Image (spheres, rainbow, N blue to C red):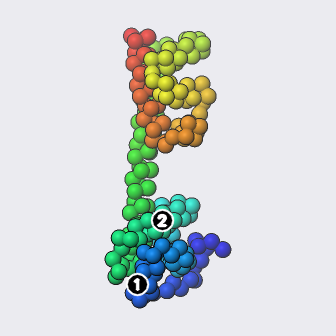
Amino acid sequence: MGWYETTDVVTPSHSPIRDAEWLVRLRAGDETALREIMETHFAPIASLALRYVHSRDLASDVAQDAFIRLWEYRGGLAPDTSIRAYLSRIARNRAVDMLRHDAHLERLEQRVTDEYLTSVSHTRNHGSENVEQDEFHALVHAVANTLTPRVREVLLLYYDEQLTPGEIADVLGVAPKTVYAQLRTALQVYTRALVGRWP
């Protein structure tokens, strides 16, 4: 049974004495203390994250990040720190950051899509349906040759291999937002080339 399937678990109430003991052990580098804290608080922290990210996998990642941060910053925690409150604050902030990041990627993707549709509309409005496929292919490669190596690679993966931005990110081992930005740059150059080709 996963943490997200647990509906009747009664989590221990906050115990300042227990927290103080754990904090002493954490500062001493006692990994057993961290494990005990995770066993006590993982489910409620992950459940808190789930309210924000609406994904069990992401909620687990958020919770794990909170415990990692607790361990990394254990030396700076005040003796009267509430561990549950500390973890909750970290999880909430991490979940909100994820939501902002996803919203930013969505805006980038929409801009890329809009610019691509603009370029397609432009070519159709200027009789591009009569242009041979190899001529279109040549234009894409001509544009690609004017770009930096990485942006060129992104453009060709997008057009030649028909990969989505997410798939390109996986292939190149980079963040999706990097691919969106590079693809947007390439499409801007491509659109300008179409304007020059069909005045």
Q: Pointer 1: what residue?
A: 20
**Residue 196 at x, y = what percent?**
40, 12
10 Å crowding of disc 2: few (<14), some (14-19), many (20+): some
Residue 73: quarter of image: bottom left
The front one of 64 and 157 is: 64
Counting residues from the start of the chain, the first of labels 1 and 2 encountered is: 1
Residue 50 visible from this viewpoint: no
**Secondary structure at numbered mark 1:** helix
Residue 68, disc: 2
Q: What residue appears at the point 45 percent right and 17 percent down from the top-left corner? A: 146
Amino acid identity at mark 2: Ile
Residue 94: quarter of image: bottom left
In the picture, the quarter occupied by the N terminus is bottom right
Position of 44 compared to 93: left or right? right
Tell whether label 2 touches label 1 (CB within 8 Å): no
Q: Is residue 72 above or below residue 98?
A: below
Q: Is residue 36 above or below residue 89?
A: below
Q: What residue appears at the point 52 percent right and 61 percent down from the top-left corner? A: 61
Q: Is residue 108 above or below residue 99?
A: above
Q: In the orientation shown, which residue stands out farthest toward the front?
A: 28
Q: What residue appears at the point 51 percent right and 65 percent down from the top-left corner? A: 64
**Residue 172 at x, y = what percent?**
56, 36
Position of 176 compared to 132: left or right? left
Amino acid identity at mark 1: Ala
The front one of 23 and 56 is: 23
**Residue 84 at x, y = what percent?**
43, 77
